[in-house]
Amino acid sequence: MLGGIGAALVVGAPAAAADAGGSVRLGAAGAVAAGHGGRRAPRPVAPVNQEAAARFGPEYKTLPAAVAGVDIEPLIGINAAADIAARRRHLIDYVWKDAGQPKTLPTVETGVTVPELAGLTGVRRIDLLTVPLKYRVTAKVYDLLPRKGWNRRLALYHNGHGEPPDTMLRVTQALLDRGYRVMVYAMPFHHWNAQGIEDPAAPGTMLPGPSHRELPPWESAGFSTLTFFLEPLTVTLNYAQATYRPVSTEMIGLSGGGWTTTVYSALDPRVTRSYPVAGSLPFFLRPASPKPRPTIGDFEQTKESLPGFYAASSDDFLDMYVMASVGEGRGQLQILNRFDECCFNGVGHRVYQAPVRDRVRLLAGGRPEQGRWDLLEDATHDDHTISPHALSVILWDLDTANVTT
């Protein structure tokens, strides 16, 4: 288990300080010591849900045959800081075709009403950030200001491909209650981003919004459809940095939003800590995921669709886990549901947990404040969600600035 760092070192939380009388004042991470005699609160733990486990066969409890004899170390292609820089540059060049990440800002409408977010409490104001994209597509992002005092930290929550709003609302509410400013994202052509798109073969002609698997006609040597997924994050983070300047940015995503969290936190070091949930497995493990069939992934998640993006001789996703985790104050906790009804389930991930964690530790020089990674296998349920247990671990991690299981 990686060693944690205390509240005084957390990026984005005020350090503990002594007042004139010699007592200790705690800032946003005050919960670290509260009720535990000045020690860090222990990480939440939970047992396997035996009722759920009884409904699943041995393939959910034992390593798959596909991992037998696989040497994980050579599949991780990040061996030095220069490798991270080169790989990040490749990803950015592919997505934005050598133009670099955009420096643009969104249009802003303040004080909007959002029916999908109406159940939230403790919201002072919701602003609508609109990001124009190519082919007459736009991305809407909602920027939520907490009613309680802002803790100077920004959290990004990214929903998946049509998941119901309950997980989004539960996670967003917990962040607001802790004083986070929260930006809420939806996948392209889903939820509040449902819309048409311009026909690439007939400019000016609008077509119905495509599914992600219908995007190939828009992918070309001069344009990547990955901008539909990633550019809204870049542009809205530009806005946050230009206006209210958060001292840290955390990112949480479920399913397709978990994939987005994995990719974007690898690509943009402005994301401090990241928590992708049920969003990816390394390519070598994809055929071994047991239910409902081997988890191959959506259009944007496959080498076949985007061979120029997933172009590493190593396993791209293992590299991305490392890239998202190394750097001052950075860390990632990947969360996978063992009995997930959708995807990326089973226990095959156990074969890469220690190698990725150790590679990050090596690149960070053994200093957790310079990088940390770990994986939480959630066996408390059998849903495709961020469970109450997983959320409690995420919040614990944010409060203690310690990405570790």
Image (cartoon, rainbow, N blue to C red):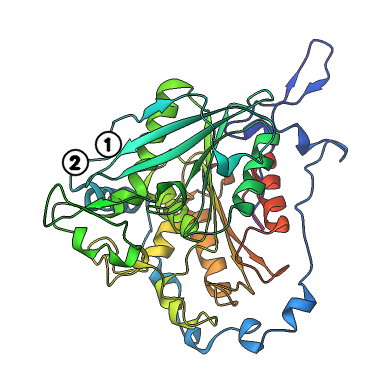
Residue shown at 45% from the left, 50% from the top? 324
Q: Is residue 372 above or below residue 369?
A: below
Figure quadrant of the N terminus: bottom right
The amino acid sitting under disc 1 is: Pro
Horizontally, residue 17 falls left or right of residue 73, namely right
| Residue 99: mark | 2
Horizontally, residue 59 falls left or right of residue 306, namely right
Q: Position of residue 381 (x, y in %)?
A: 71, 69
Horizontally, residue 322 falls left or right of residue 6, namely left
Q: Residues within 10 Å of mark 1 (few under 14, many from 20)?
A: few
The amino acid sitting under disc 2 is: Ala
Q: Position of residue 106 (x, y in %)?
A: 35, 31
Q: Is residue 242 above or below residue 249?
A: above
Q: Helix, strand, or loop for circle 1?
A: loop
| Residue 102: mark | 1
In the rendered structure, are the residues bearing label 2 and label 1 in contact, judged by CB atoms less than 8 Å apart? yes
Q: Residues within 10 Å of mark 2 (few under 14, many from 20)?
A: few
Of all residues, the one furthest to the top in this rendering is 20
Q: Nearer the viewer, residue 159 or 378?
A: 159
Residue shown at 56% from the left, 67% from the top? 353
Q: Position of residue 74 (x, y in %)?
A: 39, 71
